[in-house]
Image (spheres, helix red, strand yellow):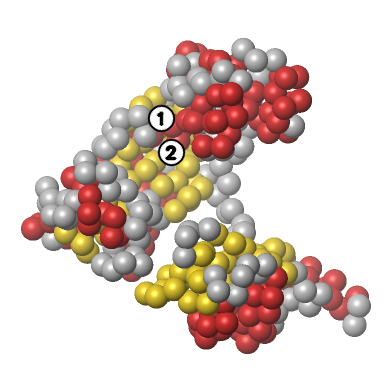
Amino acid sequence: MPPIPRKILHVDMDAFYASVEQRDDPSLRGRPVVVAWRGARSVVCAASYEARVFGVRSAMPASRAERLCPQAIFVPPDFTRYKAVSRQVREIFARHTDLIEPLSLDEAYLDVTTTLSKLPSATATAEAIRQAIREETRLTASAGVAPNKFLAKIASDWNKPNGLFVIRPQQVEAFLAPLAVNRLPGVGRVMEAKLAALDIRTVGDLRVRPLSELEQRFGRWGRRLHELSAGIDEHVVQPDRPTLQVSAEDTFEHDLTLDELEPHIRRLAEKTWAAHQRESEGEHGRVARTVVLKLKTSDFHTLTRSLTPALRPSSARQLADIACALRERVDRPVDVRYRLVGVGLAGFVDRDSYFAQSDLFD
C-alpha cells in the first residue's frame, strides 16, 4: 500500500517577544515596540507589527531602528519571561503529538499525521492549537499545514499575523509555480542571482529545467533545488534534535583589536562551558570536541576559526586557552578592529562512546 501522506504543521508565534511585552504592559498595546537594549552596539531582538510598518526588523542595529522609527518604545529583552511562555506553548503542542521539533522559543514543526487528540484533520488540529494558545497565553500564533516541512513553513507566513493557511497535496505544484525562487529554503541572494542569470526567477521556471542541467551547474544542491521545485521534502520532524553547538558571544561598545580580546574570550568561555556541562549531564549526555572562535570586524565581516584537538577541552580554562590561541589563525592586519567575539563548542558526540574510545588509547 502507498505510504500515508504526512501532515505537518509549522506554528509560529506572532512578533513573540514584542507581543509578550505588549500583553504584560497595556500601555504598549497598539504602539511601535522594539525589543532591544538601547545603544550603538545593540541589535533588535523583535519588533511589534506597529514598528515593522516603519521597516524595523529583527537583527538590524538598534541605532538604525531608532532612525527608522523615532517614536519607537525600546524595551530591554526579558528571556526568562519569554522562555516561560514558550514552555506553555510547548505543553499545548504536546496535547496533540509527541513529534515536536522546536526551532526556537517561538516556532516549531509538528507531525500530526496521527494525533493524541484524535481530531478529524490536520487543519482542525492547527485551529485547536491556535485557539488554546490564544486562550491560555493571551497571544496569537500563525500556522501552516502542508504535506512536508518546507511547505508548512512557507504556509505559516502566508496569512500572518494570527492566520492559518493550508496547502493540500493536490495543490502543491500550482501553489509553488508562481513563487519567487527566494522563497525556497537555502536560496539566498547569491543563489538567487545565479539562478536569475539563467533566467530562472520563479519556482515554475526552476521546475521545467532538466535535473541534469541543475546538477551539472550546482552539483548535489542542483538535485535539491529540483526536488524543492516539485514540492518534495523528505526531512522528518525530529523531536530530539541533537545539539550542534553551544556558544556565547558579545558585542562591544567600542571596537577592539585582536590583542584586546583575551579577557572577553575567557569570560565567554566560562558561559559556554556552563552550557556545555548542562548538555553533557542531560539524559542523552553528549560532549563537544571542537572549539570555535567567532569574530565580527568593525565593517561587519564575520570570521570563524575552529580546532578539534586530540583531547577535547575538559574545563572552561582549557576552552579559553584554545579559543585565545585560535586568534593566531586570523590572517587580518593587526590594526583591524572587532565589534563582536564569540566562543563556541561543536562536534558533539555521545559521552559514553567518547570515553570508551579514549580508554582504548590510554
Task: Categorize mark 2 by other alpha carbons within 10 Å: few (<14), some (14-19), many (20+).
Answer: many
Quadrant of res 228: top right
Label 1 to label 2, Cα distance in Å? 8 Å
To which residue does mark 1 refer? 155
Task: Give x and y (percent) for residue 233.
Answer: 60, 30
Q: Do residues under tags 1 and 2 come within 8 Å of each other at their CB atoms?
A: yes
Task: Give x and y (percent) for residue 251.
Answer: 43, 70
Left or right: residue 99 versus residue 219 is left
Task: Give x and y (percent) for residue 121.
Answer: 41, 26
- Callout 1: helix, strand or loop? helix
Residue at x-position 47% and y-position 65%:
298
Task: Give x and y (percent) for residue 241.
Answer: 59, 53
Three-letter code, disc 1: Ala
Residue at x-position 58% and y-position 46%:
238
Quadrant of res 62: bottom left
Residue at x-position 51% and y-position 64%:
296
Q: Quadrant of the C terminus?
A: bottom right
Please tell me which of labels 1 and 2 falls first in the chain: 2
| Residue 1 to residue 93: above or below | above
To which residue does mark 2 refer? 10
Left or right: residue 27 versus residue 346 is left
Task: Categorize mark 1 by other alpha carbons within 10 Å: few (<14), some (14-19), many (20+).
Answer: many
Is residue 31 visible in the rendered image? The answer is yes
Is residue 319 visible in the rendered image? The answer is no
